[in-house]
Amino acid sequence: MSEPIRILIVDDHAVVRKGLAMVLRLEPSLEVVGEAQNGREGLEAAARLQPDLVLVDLVMPEMDGQEMALALRKSHPNIKIMMLTGTEVDDRVFDLLAAGIEGYVLKNIEPSELTGAIRAVMRGEAYLHPDVLKKVLGRVQAETKSAPAVALTPRELEILEWMATPHTYRQIAAHLNISEETVRSHAKSVLEKLKQPNRAQAVLAAVRMKLIKMDAG
């Protein structure tokens, strides 16, 4: 049996922290190792506890989630970061994505979707809540410019289009009736050809390069 995913929750609202912890502790494969009420405490806890993933509220006093996430990315690049917000998606998401933050979810997310998103991020897949994805794609498509041609095979282009959805690689494999390993192999090739570090940034680059066109509505 594999080790549980160790999670640190950082949120200034105690009720939210306790609620998230309760939901996550229902999953045997997840372990909440600590809580913090602001970004400064979150950084200290992350350094001390060395969690696999930190779930960070975007809006907090003293040090907000964006500042904490960017600092944590520099000091502990091995720790996965998932942003959590109850507010309307704002432009900070673009800076966070550019910094390589792996996940961005809204607080109205269903528990099963949250746990699925955490597992996806731990498998190396970036996860964007569909509402976040719509905003990001809307802005990126408005900024598209001519870009150098990138030679993708028909299958790689198909996988790239699926990568621009909330589906996990496992779900993509099931839809295409191929193995998950095959999907991952094609996705890896796409990342290398687009010269991008992760799935989310590859999709943004592909939209800018007009390799794919997404419905942002």
Image (cartoon, helix red, strand yellow):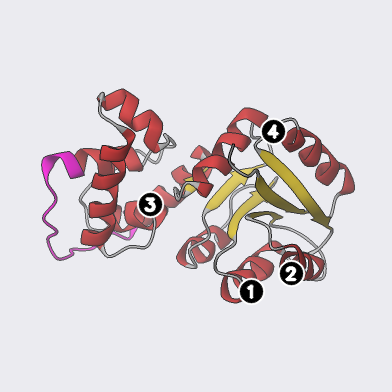
Residue 10, x across and y down, in percent: 76, 56
Q: Position of 56 compared to 92: left or right?
A: right
Q: Which residues are magenta?
A: 141-156
Asked if the residue under mark 3 is in contact with the one under mark 2, i.e. CB atoms within 8 Å, the reply is no
Q: Is 102 placed above or below 173 here?
A: below
Give the alpha-carbon distance from disc 4 to disc 3, as whole Å: 27 Å
Residue 151, x across and y down, in percent: 11, 55
Give the alpha-carbon distance from disc 3 to disc 1, as whole Å: 22 Å
Q: Residue at point 75% right, 62% down?
A: 49
Give the alpha-carbon distance from disc 4 to disc 1, as whole Å: 30 Å
Q: Which residue is mark 4?
A: 28
Secondary structure beneath label 4? loop
Q: Which residue is mark 2?
A: 43
Task: Using the image, tell me which numbered label, if any, was put on residue 193.
Answer: none
**What quarter of the picture does the C terminus occupy?**
top left
**What quarter of the picture does the N terminus occupy?**
top right
Q: Amino acid at mark 2?
A: Leu
Q: Amino acid at mark 3?
A: Arg
- Closer to the chain start, of discs 4 and 1, is 4
Q: From the image, state whether disc 4 or disc 3 is nearer to you.
A: 4
Q: Position of 150 compared to 88: left or right?
A: left
The stretch drawn in magenta includes residue 111: no
Q: Which residue is mark 1?
A: 71
- Closer to the chain start, of discs 3 and 1, is 1
Secondary structure beneath label 2? helix
- Closer to the chain start, of discs 4 and 3, is 4
Q: Amino acid at mark 1?
A: Ala
- Closer to the chain start, of discs 2 and 1, is 2
Q: Residue at point 26% right, 26% down?
A: 176
Asked if the residue under mark 2 is in contact with the one under mark 4, i.e. CB atoms within 8 Å, the reply is no
Q: Which residue is mark 3?
A: 199
